[in-house]
Image (cartoon, rainbow, N blue to C red):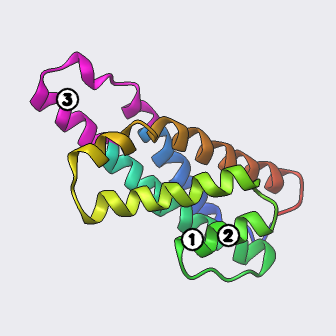
Amino acid sequence: MEQANGYEKKLNSLEQALGSFKKAMTIDASEFGAIEADTIKSGQVQKFEVCVELFWKTTKQYLYDIHGVESISPKMAIKQLYRTQYTDARNYEMLIEMVNDRNRLSHVYNEDQFEEIYCRLPEYLKLVQAIVKNFRGSQNNGNG
């Protein structure tokens, strides 16, 4: 358990951010006027971006502390997550797409693309929550 302390703070922060993201996603922006809806969606997307950042950094630390595996980028961390069998091929592809979507949102604003990505946020939330649960499960089973 000594090794686990390196990623424990990151994991706790990620869980808090996911909780905040989940709460934000309970707000139905379509119930508001255009300006308010845009503001709500922008806030939800910002919480998504924070979660993606925390997710890959937590994954990076987890893999290093538990498996001695180095990852220097979000996609490399996700690839290592797959190689260490913490996720399957379908979820691996979805995680890569999640990082790509985060990058698209962060670098170029395109309203159609924004809406397309926005529709995937609930799926990404569920996926990251499941992986965090697996991290906790392996930690509690003595594997980490």
Q: Earlier in the sequence, mark 1 or mark 3?
A: 3
Q: Amino acid at mark 2?
A: Lys
Q: Residues within 10 Å of mark 1 (few under 14, many from 20)?
A: some
The residue positioned 31% from the left and 57% from the top of the image is: 105
> Left of 66 or right of it: where is 107?
left
Label pair 1/3, CB-CB below 8 angstroms: no
Main secondary-structure element of the magenta-colored stretch: helix
Which residue position is annotated with label 2?
79
Q: Nearer the viewer, residue 2 or 129?
A: 129
- Please give the range of residues in magenta: 22-44
Asked if residue 33 lies in the magenta stretch, the reply is yes
Which type of secondary structure does the marked residue at label 3 adopt? Answer: helix
Q: Residues within 10 Å of mark 3 (few under 14, many from 20)?
A: some
Q: Using the image, tell me which numbered label, if any, was put on residue 37.
A: 3
Q: Quadrant of residue 71?
A: bottom right
Asked if residue 64 lies in the magenta stretch, the reply is no
> Left of 118 or right of it: where is 5?
right
- In the rendered image, which quarter contains the C terminus? bottom right
Alpha carbons under labels 1 and 3: distance apart: 32 Å
Q: Using the image, tell me which numbered label, if any, was put on residue 75.
A: 1
